[in-house]
């Protein structure tokens, strides 16, 4: 059985035919937010319903990094290597300093509470971009059920000035997001409210030098499933979550191939010695596969 399905011949050169999709750890409820710490040699990821962030080490051990985690979801690292986290329970985005101190970067906009920050990326200028759908306040499963105070927007934090700005306000439910390698493009998923006929696509925005967004056309429709999370490789191919595994989409929006994963995939990140190992969070388990590609962004 192959772990890979090729739709365009170039995909064969992206994967290693004898490299397995391996299950690294299992027994969780809904894993999300993988982030690689090469300096510490570990992967952090969220187990959202169990209110914890876990740490996987290459020796196979899994330990608790933080519990309770305020129902943390997506993570990344800033330019100084600090952990940046989205928290459903406290409805905020935080930064964990090298000394362990947690700083709140955003918890409100326009005088109203954020919904439940979902996923986050950091641009090379240090600004922090995150999505704020309402998934974490819809029920008590992945946070605390609460009234929605704001539309489901995409925001940018400027930590130098302490400002939070809404940069995209026409989403149903924004979710995964990633910059292209040269940061001229921002991809943002819209995963809708999980109703039939809701969007399951990724939109592509042009990013101006001052950070302004334009465009925002539909770049690719994920089928089956939704683009809960994705990352770019160094050539700008997008590796995205889907219901049946990981889909590889080229910068023109063409599906090149898929990595088949036995569980519904939520998110992924590149890591390992050469940023060539894709770590995949999928429902109850964490998987990985080594590719003949490298991730473009450290986290
Ligand atoms: Mg997500």
Image (cartoon, rainbow, N blue to C red):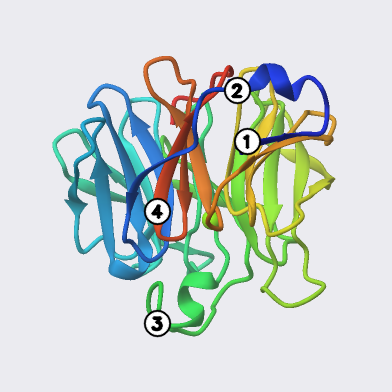
Image quadrant holding the N terminus, namely top right
Toward which corner of the image does residue 169 lie, by quadrant? bottom right
**Which tag is nearer the camera, tag 2 or tag 4?**
2
The local secondary structure at tag 3 comes to: loop
Answer yes or no: do the residues labelled 3 and 2 have beta carbons within 8 Å? no
Query: Any mark on residue 140, and which?
Result: 3
As drawn, 145 above or below 193:
below
> Does the image show residue 75?
no
The location of residue 168, given as percent across then percent down, is 70, 53
For marks 1 and 4 on the same chain, the one whose residue lies earlier in the sequence = 1
**Which tag is nearer the camera, tag 3 or tag 1?**
1
Query: Any mark on residue 2, and which?
Result: 1
Q: Point out the residue furthest to the left here.
A: 99
For label 2, the residue is: 17
Answer yes or no: do the residues labelled 3 and 1 have beta carbons within 8 Å? no
Cα distance, mark 2 to mark 1?
A: 8 Å
The location of residue 248, given as percent across then percent down, is 70, 35
Image quadrant holding the C terminus, namely top left
Answer yes or no: do the residues labelled 2 and 1 have beta carbons within 8 Å? yes
For marks 2 and 4 on the same chain, the one whose residue lies earlier in the sequence = 2
Q: What residue is rendered at 59% in x and 54% in y?
A: 228
Toward which corner of the image does residue 237 lie, by quadrant? top right
> Crowding at label 1, few (<14), some or many (≥20) Cα neighbours within 10 Å?
few
> Crowding at label 2, few (<14), some or many (≥20) Cα neighbours within 10 Å?
few
As drawn, 98 above or below 235:
below
Query: Any mark on residue 285, and which?
Result: 4
Mark 4 C-beta to ligand 1 under 8 Å: no
For marks 3 and 2 on the same chain, the one whose residue lies earlier in the sequence = 2
Answer yes or no: do the residues labelled 1 and 4 have beta carbons within 8 Å? no
Q: What residue is rendered at 51% in x and 80% in y?
A: 138
């Amino acid at each position: 059985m192959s772990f890979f399905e090729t739709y365009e011949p170039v995909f064969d050169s992206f994967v290693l035919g004898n490299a397995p999709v391996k299950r690294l750890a299992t027994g969780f409820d809904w894993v999300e937010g993988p982030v690689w710490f090469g300096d510490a040699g570990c992967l952090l990821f969220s187990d959202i319903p169990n209110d914890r962030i876990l740490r996987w080490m290459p020796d196979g051990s899994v330990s608790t990094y933080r519990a309770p985690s305020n129902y943390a979801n997506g993570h990344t690292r800033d330019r100084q290597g600090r952990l940046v986290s989205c928290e459903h329970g406290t409805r905020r985005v935080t930064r964990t300093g090298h000394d362990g101190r947690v700083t709140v970067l955003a918890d409100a906009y326009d005088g109203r509470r954020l919904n439940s920050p979902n996923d986050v990326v950091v641009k090379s200028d240090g600004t922090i971009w995150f999505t704020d759908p309402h998934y974490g306040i819809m029920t008590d499963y992945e946070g605390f059920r609460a009234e929605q105070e704001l539309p489901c927007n995409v925001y940018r934090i400027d930590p130098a000035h302490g400002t939070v700005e809404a940069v995209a306000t026409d989403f149903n439910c924004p979710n995964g997001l990633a910059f292209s390698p040269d940061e001229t493009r921002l991809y943002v998923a819209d995963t809708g409210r999980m109703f039939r006929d809701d969007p399951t696509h990724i939109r592509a925005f042009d990013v101006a030098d001052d950070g302004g967004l334009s465009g925002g056309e539909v770049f690719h429709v994920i089928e089956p499933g939704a683009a809960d999370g994705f990352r770019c490789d160094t050539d700008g191919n997008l590796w995205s979550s889907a219901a049946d595994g990981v889909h590889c989409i080229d910068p023109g929006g063409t599906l090149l191939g898929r990595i088949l994963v036995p569980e519904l995939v939520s998110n992924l990140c590149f890591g390992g010695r050469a940023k060539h190992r894709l770590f995949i969070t999928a429902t109850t388990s964490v998987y990985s596969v080594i590719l003949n590609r490298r991730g473009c962004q450290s986290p």
